[in-house]
Image (cartoon, rainbow, N blue to C red):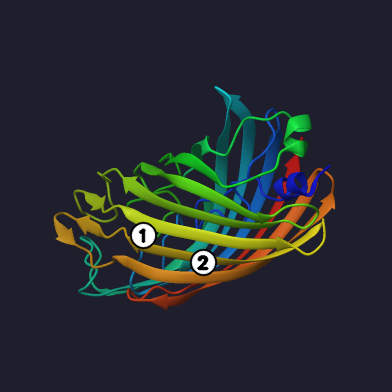
């Protein structure tokens, strides 16, 4: 089993909030399956899905995501489908002022008792465009990886728990469509590989026709996110990495009035991964907002356990 495959064993699966994480979109053998469980602890002023800035909010959330991944070939090209169920809890308080109006909620501070339930699940399709052939395991082990370019399409399905009478929800009550390329640059192979991943995407949102409070509708501008990860294996089983994530846009408009919550923030993080058994791997990352022009605040701990079969 080569180090390239070992890298895969700790990578599969993603959670919607706070990005995909390192080694989430590497090349994998045709015919393989992977199940990943991700736990995240978040403290921020964003909604549970992580795509709407809420000025004046102070929220703590935990996210538990279970993903199934299937790797296969389409016309000789690598392909992947992924389905992710998201569960978790959120609580804290939201302070509303003149800059973030919500019909039915006058300015003031609204405590939110912590509650748990299901968020919006996601489904994704990824297809190799350059340098990503569909390879069975014997060919994959011998394959020398170079620059890889993939096309990614992901959707958030609005069936998470949602209540118009509360300011904070687990679901979003509108569809999310995310598209963009994912790029992988292997700097070295062998037993201790190094990977650079760059994932620039844009998310589009349908209109929420039953928003919180007494509003009629809420729309949202596209949200641009660029995520990058540089990881290196210190040994065939142990790797370390650094992450950067920039997001811009996503301002909401409620009944024709801009909400003044456009995102413009840069986050950074560090991580470490370890291959426990041949099919079983784990990694942990820590990240924080390090620069912003929008009032964003946030810290995150993430642990992911992956099983390949």
- Dot 1: element: loop
Residue with the mark numbered 2: 244
Quadrant (top left/top right/bottom left/bottom right) for the C terminus:
top right
**Quadrant position of residue 98:** bottom left
Q: How many numbered tags mark residues here?
A: 2
Q: Earlier in the sequence, mark 1 or mark 2?
A: 1
- Nearest to the eye among marks 1 and 2: give it: 2
Q: Are circles 1 and 2 on residues that touch, CB within 8 Å?
A: no
- Dot 2: element: strand
Q: Residues within 10 Å of mark 1 (few under 14, many from 20)?
A: many
The residue depicted at 24 percent of the width and 51 percent of the height is: 218
**Quadrant position of residue 70:** top right
Q: Residues within 10 Å of mark 2 (few under 14, many from 20)?
A: many
Residue 52: image tag: 1
Residue 50 in view: no
Please tell me which residue lies in front, 25 or 166.
25
Quadrant (top left/top right/bottom left/bottom right) for the N terminus:
top right
Please tell me which residue lies in front, 178 or 44.
178
The residue depicted at 77 percent of the width and 38 percent of the height is: 141
Cα–Cα span, label 1 and label 2 = 19 Å
The residue depicted at 61 percent of the width and 49 percent of the height is: 24
Residue 31's place in the image compared with 179, above or below, is: above
Where is residue 196? Give x, y as percent: 59, 58
């Amino acid at each position: 089993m080569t180090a390239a495959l070992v890298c895969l064993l700790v990578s599969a699966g993603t959670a919607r909030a706070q990005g995909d994480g390192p080694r989430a979109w590497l090349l994998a053998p045709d015919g393989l399956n992977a199940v990943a469980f991700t736990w995240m602890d978040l403290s921020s002023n964003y909604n549970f899905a992580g795509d709407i800035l809420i000025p004046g909010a102070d929220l703590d959330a935990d996210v538990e995501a279970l993903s199934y991944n299937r790797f296969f070939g389409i016309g000789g090209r690598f392909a992947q489908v992924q389905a992710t169920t998201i569960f978790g809890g959120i609580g804290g308080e939201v302070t509303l002022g003149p800059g973030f109006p919500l019909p039915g909620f006058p300015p003031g501070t609204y405590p939110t008792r912590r509650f748990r339930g299901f968020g919006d699940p996601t489904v994704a399709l990824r297809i190799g465009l350059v340098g990503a052939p569909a390879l069975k395991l014997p060919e994959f082990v011998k394959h020398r990886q170079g620059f890889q370019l993939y096309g990614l399409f992901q959707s958030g399905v609005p069936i998470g728990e949602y209540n118009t009478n509360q300011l904070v929800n687990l679901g979003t009550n509108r569809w999310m469509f995310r598209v963009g390329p994912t790029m992988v640059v292997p700097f070295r192979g062998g037993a201790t590989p190094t990977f650079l991943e760059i994932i620039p995407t844009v998310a589009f949102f349908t209109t929420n026709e039953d928003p919180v409070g007494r509003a009629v509708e809420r729309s949202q501008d596209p949200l641009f996110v660029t995520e990058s990860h540089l990881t290196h294996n210190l040994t065939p089983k142990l790797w370390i990495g650094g992450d950067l994530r920039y997001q811009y846009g996503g301002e909401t408009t409620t009944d024709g009035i801009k909400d003044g919550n456009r995102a413009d923030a840069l986050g950074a993080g560090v991580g470490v991964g370890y291959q426990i058994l041949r099919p079983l791997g784990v990694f942990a990352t820590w990240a924080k907002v390090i620069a912003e022009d929008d009032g964003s605040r946030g810290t995150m701990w993430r642990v992911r356990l992956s099983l390949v079969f």
